[in-house]
Image (cartoon, rainbow, N blue to C red):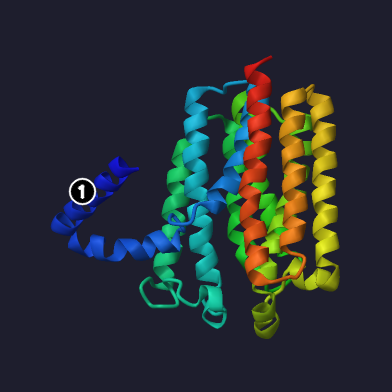
Amino acid sequence: MQFILEIKAKLSRWLSTNFPKLHERLPAFVQLTRLDRPIGVYLLLWPTLSALWIAAQGWPDLHLLLIFVLGTWLMRSAGCAINDFADSNFDGSVLRTRNRPIISGRVKRHEALITFAVLCAIAFILLLFTNTLTIQLSFFAVFIAALYPFMKRFTNLPQVVLGIAFSCGILMAFTAQLGELPPQAWLLFVANCLWTVAYDTQYAMVDREYDLQIGVKSTAILFGDADKVMIGTLQGMFVLAMLLAAAQLDLGLWFYLGLLAAVGMFVWQQRLIRDREPDGCFRAFLNNHWVGAAIFGGIFLHFLFN
């Protein structure tokens, strides 16, 4: 940790000396792309890595591992940039988002759009080292990622669109490793969509009172007083889908132990959201990082010892 801090300090001094304007504005773009808050990267990365390990029946090709790890960071950052672009008329009215860089004037709206385009372009260059089917899927993934932030204006189900966006990496992992999409890939895709809707509903519960005032739609608003039941139902459906996938993929004890740990965390999340307090709902949302890690850990250990 000390080594990393020293590198950051040296890099900061070098930038301030040689590129003072970039050094001055860099923190705003870090905040725009949420590089200082990696929870979204984790929620994207764990299911993608799980799919990559399953597709490869163990360690995937090294270049694919690097492509998907870097691509996850890039596309999550791009998604945050386009999200702030789309929400610039709303974020100032929400306590949690009123200090975001577009609202505070540190980043212009067109700069956020350029950031989105540049990050997508870099991610696309990485995909050129995969195959045609994966590249074709990437166009759909970018379209859904760009579409999601605008859906909260038109539908109470924007979390479903986010679920699709957050699950495209699963399909692309299979196509990159195998060159095709077996039925199990679609099953994992559906399972991840269910999980994403569940945890993003927890996230939406944090801002529900503000969203009601400004007219933003979400599943937290749609579910109303049934929110906790619906989250539990979605989590249960996710677990059932993962059990079905495990049976089809012949995953063993290590996977089931990882999934059991995830179930325990779902129970804990229900306790955190029981009073619908914003802090508890946000903690429940963050806890899903460990759900993904536990499931990937089970998959990793299964292939390591089989």
**Secondary structure found at label 1:** helix
Task: Tell me the residue at 23%/49% (across/down).
Answer: 11
Quadrant for the N terminus in the image: top left
Query: Residue 60 placed where, x, y %?
Result: 57, 23
Would you say 271 lies left or right of 78 here?
A: right
Up-down: is 31 above or below 35?
A: below
Q: Residue furthest bottom?
A: 213
Mark 1: amino acid: Lys
- Residue closer to the observer: 270 or 18: 270
Q: Quadrant of residue 298?
A: top right
- Residue closer to the observer: 226 or 173: 226
- Residue closer to the observer: 129 or 92: 92
Is there any visible trace of residue 212 in the rendered image?
yes
Query: Residue 165 placed where, x, y %?
Result: 65, 51
Q: Quadrant of residue 113?
A: bottom left
Query: Residue 94 placed where, x, y %?
Result: 57, 79
Residue linked to disc 1: 10
Task: Tell me the residue at 23%/54% (across/down).
Answer: 12
Q: Quadrant of residue 136?
A: top right
